[in-house]
Amino acid sequence: MLDLFQVRRCQEDLEPSPDHPGCIYGEMMKCLRPCQQAVSREEYAAETARLVRFLETRGRSLMESVAAARDRASEALDFEQARVWHERWLRVREAASLCGELAAPLGQLNGAAVLPGQAPGAVRLAVMLGGAWLDLIDFPVAPSGPAVSLDSRLRSLLGPLEAPRIPVQERAAHIALLAQWYYGAARDAEWRPFASLESIPYRALVRDISRAASRMQGSLFPP
């Protein structure tokens, strides 16, 4: 996929400088070399915006522009150039097919899953914000004290959360762990993605908590 965009593949926290040693991808013209300040911030931001748009549209943004260029070449009877554009369109389509269900801009890579709890009468909430895992949250299903709905308790718990600030390499490891769990055959919980804290699917999480609690202890929510 990255062969379609001139963005960096490295994971270091960059300190751009003309003296930066660069890498093989820059020499092969597969990266705009922001590390060496070969382009302006605006130019590199425009290229990354193209990549973000590609992911947001599951490849449609680039497929449409390449198809339009192919059609223009064909209408101009430049069939050789049309063939080149069509081959590029095929590569774009192949790359788009690799955009899995988890593909999202980093700031929107948020979600939660309800896991079996270790304490009696409790489940654990696995929450990711901005591509980084938070510490597992023990969530009593029926706590002592005044009766408060699960929905209200979840809103009070999850609403104020903030994405942790961690190094790029550590965040990449967190995302890899999510992918390993999500696509693994042993996954036994639903992943509930959300673009922002304002769009957390509380109703779905309440259902997941009910099911998890029922599996552990028998139904806690009789009809």
Image: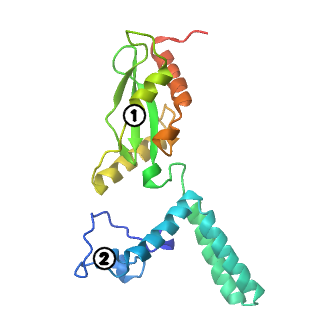
25 vs 143: above or below: below
> For the residue marked with disc 2, what is the amino acid?
Cys
Classify the position of the C terminus by image quarter: top right
102 vs 21: above or below: above
24 vs 137: above or below: below
Dot 1 crowding, Cα within 10 Å, few <14, some 14–19, many 20+: some
Q: Nearer the viewer, residue 190 or 111?
A: 111
Q: Is residue 195 visible?
A: yes
Tag 1 or tag 2, which sits nearer the N-term? 2
Q: Which residue is mark 1?
A: 126
Secondary structure state at the residue bearing disc 2? loop
Mark 2 vs mark 1, CA separation in Å: 37 Å
> For the residue marked with disc 1, what is the amino acid?
Ala
Dot 2 crowding, Cα within 10 Å, few <14, some 14–19, many 20+: some
- Foreground: disc 2 or disc 1: 1
Q: Residue at x 42, y 44 (%)?
A: 178
Secondary structure state at the residue bearing disc 1? strand
The answer to the question of whether label 2 and label 1 lie on touching residues, with beta carbons closer than 8 A, is no
Q: Residue at x 37, y 9 (%)?
A: 144
15 vs 217: above or below: below
Q: Position of residue 115 (x, y in %)?
A: 42, 28
Q: Position of residue 72 (x, y in %)?
A: 72, 83
Left or right placement of residue 178 versus residue 16 in this view: right
Q: Which residue is mark 2?
A: 23
Q: Is residue 184 visible?
A: no
